[in-house]
Amino acid sequence: MSEETAPAAGDALENLLQENRRFAPSPEFAAQSVAQAGLYAEAAQDRPAFWARQARELLSWDKDFETALDWSEAPVAKWFVGGQVNAAYNALDRHVENGLGDRVAIHFEGEPGDSRSYTYAQLTQEVKKAANAFESLGVRKGDRVAVYLPMIPEAVITLLACARIGAIHSVVFGGFSADALRSRIDDAEAKLVVTADGTYRRGKPSPLKPAVDEALSAEGHTVQNVVVVKRNGEAVSWTEGRDQWWDDTVGAASAEHTPVPHDSEHPLFILYTSGTTGKPKGILHTTGGYLTQAAFTHRNIFDLHPETDVYWCTADVGWVTGHSYVTYAPLINGATQVMYEGTPDSPHQGRWWEIVQKYKVSILYTAPTAIRTFMKWGREIPEKYDLSSIRLLGSVGEPINPEAWMWYREVIGGNKAPIVDTWWQTETGAIMISPLPGLTATKPGSAQVPVPGIAVDVVDEMGESVPDGHGGFLVIREPWPAMLRGIWGDPERYKDTYWSRFDTMYFAGDGAKKDDDGDVWLLGRVDDVMNVSGHRLSTTEIESALVSHPSVAEAAVVGANDETTGQAVVAFVILREGVENNGDATVQELRNHVGKEIGPIAKPKNVLVVPELPKTRSGKIMRRLLKDVAEGRDPGDATTLADPTVMQQIAADLRK
Ligand code: WT7
């Protein structure tokens, strides 16, 4: 963790906390609300029993569980001990058995304008075929499968096929580089990679397979096969014996496949996320608890009426939101959902609203960075479309500022759709803090209240609960069903990262404040993790990428406030002795280097070449001061620096 642990509290924040607009649910909305007021009291009375009821109601178990929660090996929880369940059966087969086979599960909209829909019966058949195909390639229960796919139905099919046979999927976002892919393949020792020739980005083909080829070009990996979905039809190079077209292997596979029961604690997936060190953490999730909380929150927080709603979560399957709220929860709950491959501005800036109009989307779940982008483009664009089908809006990924919240409500939600601001993390697996739309009077900018059955608190440095009106660190006091079960291959790091700051509480890494009503406001990360467009990036990881460039002696990275992306990556670098600073050329070279090492999403917005970096006497970089510079403020107190003149040198240098 960095030296600056106390959450920032500036004027903007004080203004925020004086927010006094309230939006109570309309009587019509409240009358049809899925969530019932009794949930909070029930959960408060006996938390594990509450979750046990949800588990039994929301999932079909092959074998009922004996114990709701076993916390005897804390901080590793076991939920629904003794139970057996198959995620894919719950997401697919059982709906078909219940007569819902003809309901649309996925309306897919490709970027170039192609579209196809899958009913539950069709999706079930595809998943059975993929499960057979993966098994024929030697994938067995417990094996790891790396997934490097665009936003196409095959991504969901692949994940569910893995879950069906008990293989552990590890999705790597398509925006990550070959190097990042390889390190994740190696860490999880993946046996199979599922990818595509590529996808489309802003009307142009965008390749994926070449990165897989590059990742596997050096010996010493564990991958036996690569299954390739044909999506954009671009030419790809081929390794005979290793590479298989999806259409050949999955296409030829039998559509008969019997799901086998898996233990409630059987690993479901690994998903890598950035931490405070250079090495991404493989967050491990298991089956029964994860599915229960994902399904519960999806049903109650989005007020899902599966017979009539059309749900659209805009997240990519490469992130946890695309796991919990695209792949698992909506299908477990029997929802009809929209999946879109491309960017919001292709071929025009009204594309999302055209999709909402076309499919009559009623529930939309997206990120503040997207909302702020639409605000910038202007309300005339969404106003051209019929958005009257929308009845609920969700937000996730970063704090949503009240202006964006109000714009979302007015322009997209027609001043009537409740907004749920949902706080959670890759590690928490499912939503933890959110209003319940039929019950809570919402407040622009606040995620407000813990989900029933979730024990969230805000504590001070000593771990004492802060009174209302005060800020501190966000913690979770009790184990929850969808919590991570560890970091793949590194149990110590799991304890150090989440359970050492406060002994018996989960430390989320976020600063938070309770307002006078006791509602929670999220204030951003208090560690060396940045949030750029809702994507998590590690300052340390980008610093390591920069110093791996031959020109760079030292690097410090900060997340500077940015109007659209929330934060932007700003890098300060010291060049090596004798390396000439070629201005823009040097900056471009370093940005591209980070793009190659980690992926385009990690490219710094700015690279500033400086003579020195501000360090404490113990040698720690004072990022707080660099953040001041990056955000155009006068650096604050620099007296703890080993060399207090460093900031003046930097300022003088940047003025040149
Ligand atoms: C971090 C987790 C959860 C899916 C997307 C991100 C920030 C997330 C909110 C919110 C304020 C939020 C936190 C958190 N965050 N949702 N509603 N309000 N901040 O998952 O990549 O694991 O990032 O995103 O800082 O710690 P992730």
Image (spheres, rainbow, N blue to C red):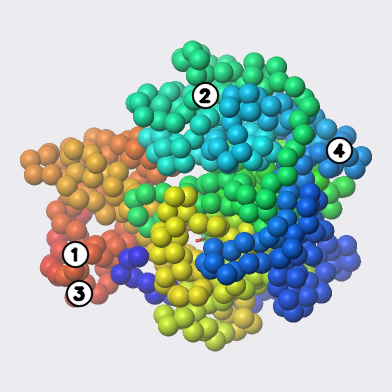
Confirm or reject: label 1 Cβ below 8 Å from ligand 1: no
Which residue, given by chain and number where applicable, does mark 3 sit on?
640
Badge nearest the viewer, 2 or 4: 2
Sequence-first disc among 2 and 1: 2
Quadrant where ligand 1 appears: bottom right
**Mark with earlier residue (3, 2):** 2
Q: Residue at x 70, y 57 (%)?
A: 82
Asked whether 128 or 555 is in front, the reply is 128
Label 3 and label 2: CA atoms lie apart by 55 Å
Q: Earlier in the sequence, mark 2 or mark 4?
A: 4
Residue type of the residue flagged with mark 2: Asn
Q: Which residue is mark 4?
A: 96
Task: Locate residue 492 relative to residue 317 in the image: left or right.
Answer: left
Q: Earlier in the sequence, mark 1 or mark 3?
A: 1
**What kind of residue is marked 1?**
Gly
Separation of residues labelled 4 and 3 (CA atoms):
66 Å
Query: Quick one: which residue is furthest to the left in this view?
Result: 578
Q: Considering only order in the chain, which callout, 3 or 4, is on the residue closer to the N terminus?
A: 4
The numbered dot on residue 225 is 2
Mark 1 lies on a secondary structure that is loop
Q: How many C-alpha atoms fall within 10 Å of the one at disc 4: few (<14), some, or many (≥20)? A: some
- Residue at 29% in and 62% down: 623
Q: Callout 3 environment at 10 Å: few (<14), some (14 to 19), or many (20+)?
A: few
Q: Is residue 590 above or below residue 230?
A: below
Looking at the rendered image, the disc whose residue lies closer to the viewer, 1 or 3, is 1
Q: Amino acid at mark 4?
A: Val
